Image: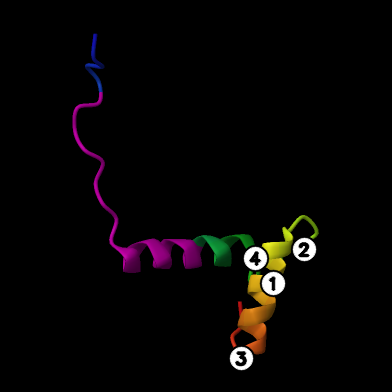
């Protein structure tokens, strides 16, 4: 039997509203920057890709 409680589609949140909500929550918690991934478990192919991006002048 199908669920009788949730028939409506969830309301889509506009991107600008989503970003504003994230900014507001970060300000409330005092988190200004998230720590970067240490990269200790990256595969060789991922390391090569990131190096190629960096060598091309990109910042990942």
Q: Are marks 4 and 3 in contact (CB under 8 Å)?
A: no
27 versus 7 height, above or below = below
Residue at left offset 56%, top offset 67%: 27
Q: Quick one: SS at disc 3?
A: loop
Residue 4 percent location from the top left of the image: 22, 16
Q: Which contiguous range is marked in magenta?
A: 6-24
Q: Tell me, for residue 57, which label it has, or none.
A: 3
Q: Is residue 9 left or right of residue 29?
A: left
- 5 or 37: nearer the eye? 37
Foreground: disc 4 or disc 3: 3
Q: Residue furthest left?
A: 8
Disc 4 from disc 3: Cα separation: 32 Å
Q: Tell me, for residue 38, which label it has, or none.
A: 2
Residue 43 percent location from the top left of the image: 72, 58
Disc 4 from disc 1: Cα separation: 35 Å
Q: Quick one: SS at disc 1?
A: helix
Other-residue count near label 3 (Cα within 10 Å), few / some / many at <14 / 14–19 / ≥20: few
Q: Is residue 31 at all visible to an observer of this figure?
A: yes
Q: Is residue 15 rendered magenta in the image? A: yes
Q: Tell me, for residue 48, which label it has, or none.
A: 1
**Residue bearing the label numbered 4:** 30
Foreground: disc 2 or disc 3: 3
């Amino acid at each position: 039997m199908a669920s009788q409680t949730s028939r409506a589609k969830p309301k889509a949140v506009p991107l600008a509203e989503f970003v504003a909500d994230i900014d507001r929550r970060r300000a409330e918690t005092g988190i200004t920057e998230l720590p970067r991934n240490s990269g200790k478990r990256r595969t060789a192919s991922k390391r090569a890709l990131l190096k190629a991006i960096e060598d091309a002048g990109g910042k990942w």
